[in-house]
Image (spheres, grey):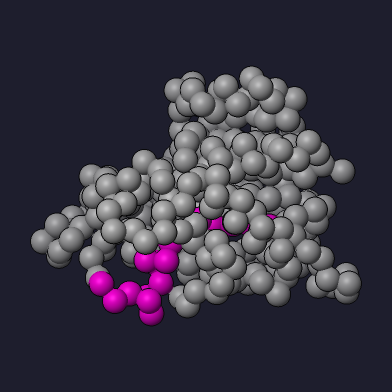
Amino acid sequence: MSAVCLVQGASRGIGLQFCKTLLMNNKTQVIATCRKPSEATDLQQLMKDNSQRLSVLNIDVTNEGTISAAASLVEQSHGKLDLLINCAGIIHPSKLGETSLKAVTSQGLLETYLVNSVGPLLMAKHFAALLSKGEGLIGKQAADKKSQHSSVLVNMSAKVGSISDNALGGWYSYRMSKAALNMATRNLSIELTRGQKKTVCIALHPGTVDTDLSRPYHKNVPKLLTAQQTVEFMLSVINSLSLDDSGKFFTYERSVLPF
């Protein structure tokens, strides 16, 4: 049996690295999605090098129609999904987090929410049926069949989305959008474990990673990770998950963060 893994937001950074690392297992089928596949040169090269096991689909998480269309294509091509990782995210449309209340705008808030909070929830909406057909190949299974899971859903969150951990303020749009994503993840963990076919749902903090998203904020970061490092850490977390972990907010080191 081959695990089918979908990485949403795979054109660069952490998403692209997830695809590279997942493909190291020659039994894994990977589906990568991004807004503009034809412009994702690194992803296109990866597909050429792995044409039998990597496919690339168009998904713009701000356009629900593209999510629905991609889900239909995956149903036709693979018929199931064992792992869904939602990676796409923005700090703010301006690429800079708000440092004060004066910098907050309705447009900035709404656009950030649309990508970081609404997009992953719509992904879950349209791919839930495929996740229910997963074969339990990701994570660790309990001995009791009633406590086993079919698939795993991972929402890429951030420590700054923790309400109780917030001591510095600022970054209104990003913090609030990730807090909303955490709530969506908790809701999903309840709904998607009610039936016989259960999906483990977690929020996952990748640490501060050397990517385009975080590059303006590297100064004074005590521990800067490469994309390869954090993906290896996070896949270790993902492969250790059981049904008891559903609804939790993990760091890449597998410690549990407070919401």
Q: Residue at x 26, y 61 (%)?
A: 171
The quadrant in which residue 149 appears is bottom right
Front residue (pair 53, 126): 53
Task: Work out whether 149 lies above or below 24.
Answer: below
> Left or right: 140 with respect to 39?
right
Residue 119 percent location from the top left of the image: 46, 50
| Quarter of the figure that contains the N terminus | top right
> Left or right: 185 with respect to 134?
left
**Range shown magenta:** 152-168
**Residue 198 seen:** no
Residue 17 percent location from the top left of the image: 56, 40
Q: Residue at x 50, y 45 (%)?
A: 227
> Left or right: 5 with respect to 143?
left
Residue 180 percent location from the top left of the image: 42, 65
Which residue reaches farthest left?
102
The quadrant in which residue 174 appears is bottom left
Task: Work out whether 65 lies above or below 98.
Answer: above
Q: Residue at x 49, y 34 (%)?
A: 11
Q: Residue at x 41, y 46 (%)?
A: 210
Magenta highlight on residue 24? no
The quadrant in which residue 140 appears is bottom right
Task: Work out whether 257 lies above or below 8.
Answer: below
Magenta highlight on residue 153? yes
